[in-house]
């Protein structure tokens, strides 16, 4: 999942979809893991401008299969491993069933603005009213409400956890006790956005470009990892944390080395528009809509597609502008 920080405005907004991943269990009251096809699916998908959805087959350039027909109603897709969903402009949510290569509708609430998928398969949605819901795995309209705070502007989910960001910049973690069961983790007015990694880590980024990791100790338990004004985005997958520096500074993608303020350069292509990380894989999309995968060697990327119709790749992507 990726967060961008603009140098003007710095207001939280969705870039393509939001969603993503973290650290503390949902507790006994959480919804059960969703039943899903056991067939393996890659962790990379793309949506085209016409609303069609494509799955990467792992065979290099142009190795893609269409699994969702063109649909002008499709606004975004969210994925986490084998779990894949699409959100429509009318607020309806659809789940991909690999066993039948088909889609089934899970909800159709016009208030739905965002969906997020956790690493263990839980699906959440955020409404324009600030209410947050978890899918109960019972089919259409099978959802339980977890909160109804009008200050909620974003949700991110991790391996077993769910978090929300408020318009007053506070960060909250779901405590697993059902409705209104949330614990405050931070209240820094500089916070621009939060992301989660599938290994169970939570990060926040400030409008100044500083990056912080949650230490797991409750309120105000955070460690600063970077304070670079050139940082415009962060992303996380597995045990890795990445940042991207804007073209107004030193364009490039960097990985955190494990030592605060120490980052290693992976790319310096000023065509890079955004990244998407999942587990140990890192992808980037260029401004010409081409998709690239990091090979593991700094500066070395393999092109997976160069279709100008690509609108976004999943998993969820969050932008701070």
Image: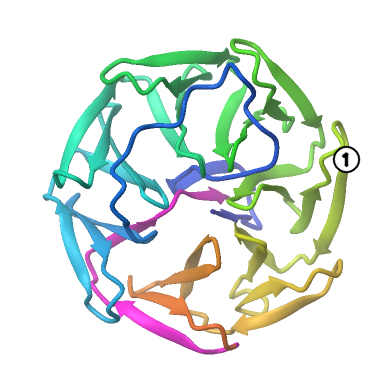
Residue 307 part of the magenta segment: yes
User: From the viewer's perspective, is residue 175 above or below residue 255?
Assistant: above
Tell me the residue that label 1 is attached to: 221
- Of 221 and 231, nearer the camera is 221
Residue located 61% across and 70% down the image: 246
* Image mark count: 1
Spot occupied by residue 23 in the image (x, y as percentages of width and height): 69, 41
The part of the chain drawn in magenta is 298-321
Q: Is 54 left or right of 205, judged from the image as shown?
A: left
- Of 44 and 244, nearer the camera is 44
Q: Is 218 left or right of 18, judged from the image as shown?
A: right
Task: Indicate the colouring scheme.
Answer: rainbow
Residue located 74% across and 30% down the image: 170
Pointer 1 local density, CA inside 10 Å: few below 14, some 14–19, many at least 20: few
Residue at the extreme front: 38
> Residue 102 appears in which quarter of the rendering?
top left
Residue located 81% across and 63% down the image: 226
Spot occupied by residue 208 in the image (x, y as percentages of width and height): 77, 55
Q: Is residue 116 visible?
A: yes
User: From the viewer's perspective, is residue 305 above or below residue 179?
Assistant: below
Residue 30 part of the magenta segment: no
Spot occupied by residue 20 in the image (x, y as percentages of width and height): 53, 45
Spot occupied by residue 1 in the image (x, y as percentages of width and height): 54, 53
User: From the viewer's perspective, is residue 191 above or below residue 171?
Assistant: below
């Amino acid at each position: 999942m990726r967060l961008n920080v603009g140098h003007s405005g710095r207001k939280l907004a969705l870039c393509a979809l939001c969603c993503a991943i973290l650290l503390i269990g949902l507790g006994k009251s959480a919804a059960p893991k969703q039943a899903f096809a056991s067939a393996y699916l890659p962790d990379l998908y793309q949506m085209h401008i016409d609303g069609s959805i494509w799955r990467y087959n792992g065979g290099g350039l142009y190795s893609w299969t269409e699994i969702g027909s063109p649909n002008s109603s499709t606004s975004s897709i969210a994925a986490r491993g084998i779990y894949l969903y699409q959100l429509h402009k009318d607020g309806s949510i659809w789940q991909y069933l690999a066993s039948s290569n088909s889609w089934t509708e899970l909800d159709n609430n016009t208030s739905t603005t965002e969906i997020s998928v956790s690493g263990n398969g839980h699906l959440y949605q955020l409404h324009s009213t600030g209410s947050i819901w978890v899918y109960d795995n019972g089919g259409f309209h099978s959802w339980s409400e977890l909160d109804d705070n009008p200050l909620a502007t974003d949700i991110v989910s991790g391996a077993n956890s769910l978090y929300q960001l408020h318009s007053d910049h506070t960060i909250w973690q779901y405590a697993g006790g059902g409705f209104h069961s949330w614990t405050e983790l931070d209240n820094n007015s500089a916070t621009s956005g939060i992301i989660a990694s599938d290994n169970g880590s939570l990060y926040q980024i400030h409008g100044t470009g500083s990056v912080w990791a949650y230490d797991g100790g409750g309120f105000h338990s955070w460690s600063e990892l970077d304070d670079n004004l050139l940082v415009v985005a962060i992303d996380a997958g597995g045990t890795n944390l990445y940042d991207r520096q804007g073209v107004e500074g030193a364009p490039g993608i960097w990985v955190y080395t494990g030592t605060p303020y120490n980052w290693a350069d992976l790319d310096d292509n000023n065509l890079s528009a955004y990244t998407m990380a999942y587990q140990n894989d890192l992808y980037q999309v260029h401004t010409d809509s081409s998709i690239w995968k990091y090979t593991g060697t700094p500066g070395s990327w393999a092109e997976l597609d160069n279709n100008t119709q690509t609108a976004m790749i999943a998993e969820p992507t969050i932008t701070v502008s």
